[in-house]
Every structure is written in C-alpha cells, then in structure tokens.
Amino acid sequence: MKKSLSYLFVGVSAAITVLLAQQLFFKPHPTVSTERIEEPTFRTALAFDSSDSNFVEAAEKTVNAVVHVKNVSLDRSPQSLFDFFYGYESFQQPEIGTGSGVIISPDGHIVTNHHVIEKAQSLEVTLNNNQTFKAQIIGSDASSDIALLKIEANRQLPYLAFGDSDRSAIGEWVLAVGNPFNLTSTVTAGIISAKARSISPMNDMSFIQTDAAVNPGNSGGALVNTRGDLIGINTAIKSRTGSYVGYSFAVPSNIAKKVVEDLLEFGTVQKGILGITTLRSSSKEAIAQGLDQIEGVYVASVAKNSGAEKAGLQEGDIIRTVDGVAIKNFTGLTGHLSSRRPGDTVSVVIERNGELLDKNVVLSKNEIADLPYLGMRVENLSNAEKKELSIKGGVKIIAVAEYYRSYNLENKIIIAIDGTPINTIEDAEKLAESGRSSKRAITLLSENGEKETLIFN
C-alpha cells in the first residue's frame, strides 16, 4: 500500500514538473493587445432594442393625454308598430356610448371620432387621473370621421402634438392607446401594415392600417410612434365579429390636423381638389384598358377651369407623385389632398407617353358632395342659378341612387332639410348626416320654381 502511494506521488510530481517546463521554456510570453473582438449578436423577434422600440417612454408620453369619452344620446327607434306610424318622440330611451379622445392642446381641445360623439345629447370626458368634465362639440366632419371637443379644466393639460403621418413607414412600430371595453389607459403595440388603405367602396378615405390590437372603445384614441408622436387617430376595425382580428385602421395625423384647423377657423372642412376624374383600378373600364396594372392614378378627364386644366394636365396622364409623396392608387391621392386646402399649390409629377413631367396645380374648392344617407350627389348652385330662381342658397341634385330613379329628382334644388334652410353642400352634408336614423323631410324646387316636399324613411 505504501509502495502504491509512493508511485502515485512520483507520477503527479513528474506531471507538474513537465507543465512548468513547458510554460518556462516553450510557450512565448503573452503580449497585450488593444484590439477588441466583437462577438456576433443574434436578435430574435422578441429582442428589445431601446434605440428604436422604446415602448415604455412612448406609452408614458401618451397615456395621460388620452381620455375616455362618454356619449349620452336618445334612442330614436320605434318600439312598436304604433310608434312607427304615430310617432315615437315621447318614447325615446337614453343610450350611452363610449370611446376615446386625444388632448391636442394644453387648454383642453380634444380630437376624437365623429361616430363617437354622433347624436350626443351630452358628452362627458374623463382624464387618466379620473377627473371628469363636460365637453362641448366645437365641430365635426362625418366624411373624415373626425370631431373636435373642448373641456374647461382651469389648468394646463398634458397633450400630444401632431406628427407627420407622411413620414411614417410600413413596418414601423406603433402603439395604440385608448379605452377598449371601458378599460382605461390600455396600450397595445404593433407595426404599420399598410398606408393609404381604403376600407369601403363608398368612401375614398385613406387610412393607416396596423396590427396593433384595437377594439370597441378604442375609437378616437391615439396611434403614436416610438417617439410618442401622434401619427393617427384610431378609428375602425374590420371583422365579422366586431372585435379585433389582426388589423385596425387609423385616420392619418396630417388629415386629422387639417380637419381640426378647418373646424377651428372656418367651422367646416375646406376640401381642395385637382379637378380630375379617374377610373378605379377595379372597374370594368380600367381592367379592359389594362389600367388595373399601373402604379399611380390614371386621369380619365379634366374639369374645365380647374387647377388641373390650368396646369396642363390631360386625359391619359398618370399621376405618379404629389409633393414628393409616391401615389400608388386613388385612395393615396385623395388621402394626400385631404391634408390640403383650396388655393394651395401642389407639385404633381405625371407620366405622359413614357416621359415624366412636373406640374404645379392650384387646388380649387370642392363644389360637389355625396349624401349617402339620402342616396344623392349634390353640387353648389352658381350665382346665375340663384338669380334665375330668386333664391339665396340651395344645392342641385346631380345624381341619385338607383332606387330613386323613378322620382325624377335630378336637377331639382334642395332648399331645406327638416325645415332648416340649405345654402351650401356643407349645410346639406351636416343635416343629412345628423338625422340619418329618422324620417327626413326634403323641400325641393323644380327647374321652373315649383316647391314640393318629399319624406324619406
């Protein structure tokens, strides 16, 4: 046993001796290097980079500027057959709807959706600190689904400044902040899935599409980028269930900002137009001519005395960019022009016979409006038409839905809706929208000046 231990000790000692000899005589001394070797870094989908995805900072900037909006209205629907035929005003039931809003100035101006405050008898706004205020409607625009409210808080309020939605990019991270299902100060994250998206064939409104979760109650809330810039007002979801299914839509901030400024300055939205008509890419005519394959907007005709005509646009031109923004479809064009006013000059690049041409077009005022809840298209009267009929205002019916064809309404003049005088297309839009769920009495003048009243259910 002693002999075995002796052999083990001798072996270990020999091994140590060999190692020391290698270190002293055979291995060169290490040198000091200042070169830094970078190890490869692999990022996963769950990796968080505070440089471009600082959700915490953006959320902190946003939540205190997003409010809860409560709309108290009256249910105007008949409760029985008796109510339907003999009136049901005395049986109106109060209804409560909720949504969100965004404070956009320290003195209490709030932007939200038109459909959030529609038909409101009273509005109540609750801040993130649970303070509640009565709100006043400054103005509203159904076509853009934007409304402007005002509360009196007697102190400076946290607010969000409008960002530039034209600079937002597909794939960019965004946060949606609002009050879904009455859950206040809810923040969800996603990316911009598409821009200049249309969600209805009846409306050319241009939306930002995102995959941030938005549900009922989010309407009117904020869509912000990772810097906390307000780049959209959350407006709609499109699903069979009525709840979020993977994508949602927001009004771009450039459109919302312009609508708010118009409501404050003019009381109505000022719409500037190029003065062209175009073919929708999905129409039979466009498909037959192969125009469904182009990227841009095909000019089908140019209105006389319009800014487009004066700038030299012609039938067959293809609009490629406006103010340096690429225009891929008609929705993109209308979306960009929605942030401009009559009298503004826009830089338009068109393609003509394979050549790119620059044109400066002065936008003219829109004189035509669609009244979808009446099934009509109307236009403002000229001074000559007013003088001929000896009237101060009114709008001419220039087209009607198919089910009104037999009434011969074209070229008749609407002078009042429910007894309220109509002077311009803006008046007609407001009144046609305000009572869309009830019977409407339309007062008309024929071309020879005869007055008649129609009841629309």
Image (tube, rainbow, N blue to C red):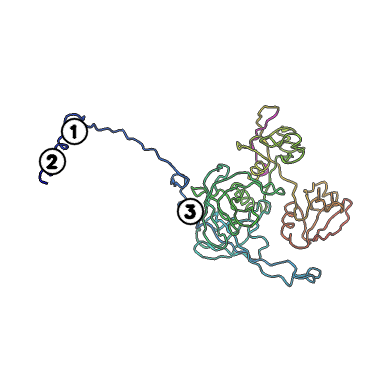
The amino acid at mark 3 is Lys
Q: Earlier in the sequence, mark 1 or mark 2?
A: 2
Secondary structure beneath disc 2? helix
Q: Main secondary structure of the magenta part?
A: strand
The amino acid at mark 1 is Gln
**Pointer 3 with pointer 2, Cβ within 8 A:** no
Quick one: quadrant of the C terminus? bottom right
Please give the name of the residue rendered at 16% of the width and 34% of the height, measured from the top-left corner. 18
**Whole-percent x, y for residue 433 in the image:** 72, 57
Secondary structure beneath disc 1? helix
Q: CA distance from mark 1 to mark 2?
A: 25 Å
192 or 42: which is nearer to us?
Answer: 42
> Is 246 on the left-hand or right-hand side of 200?
left
* Image: magenta residue range: 340-352
Residue at mark 3: 61
Q: Does the segment drawn in magenta span residue 184?
A: no
356 or 184: which is nearer to us?
Answer: 184
**Whole-percent x, y for residue 289 in the image:** 75, 34
Residue at mark 1: 23
The image quadrant that residue 29 belongs to is top left
**Pointer 3 with pointer 1, Cβ within 8 A:** no
Query: Around disc 3, counting alpha carbons within 10 Å, would you say few (fewer than 14), some (14 to 19), or many (20 or more)?
Result: some
33 or 331: which is nearer to us?
Answer: 33
The amino acid at mark 2 is Tyr
Please give the name of the residue rendered at 65% of the width and 33% of the height, measured from the top-left corner. 349
Residue at mark 2: 7
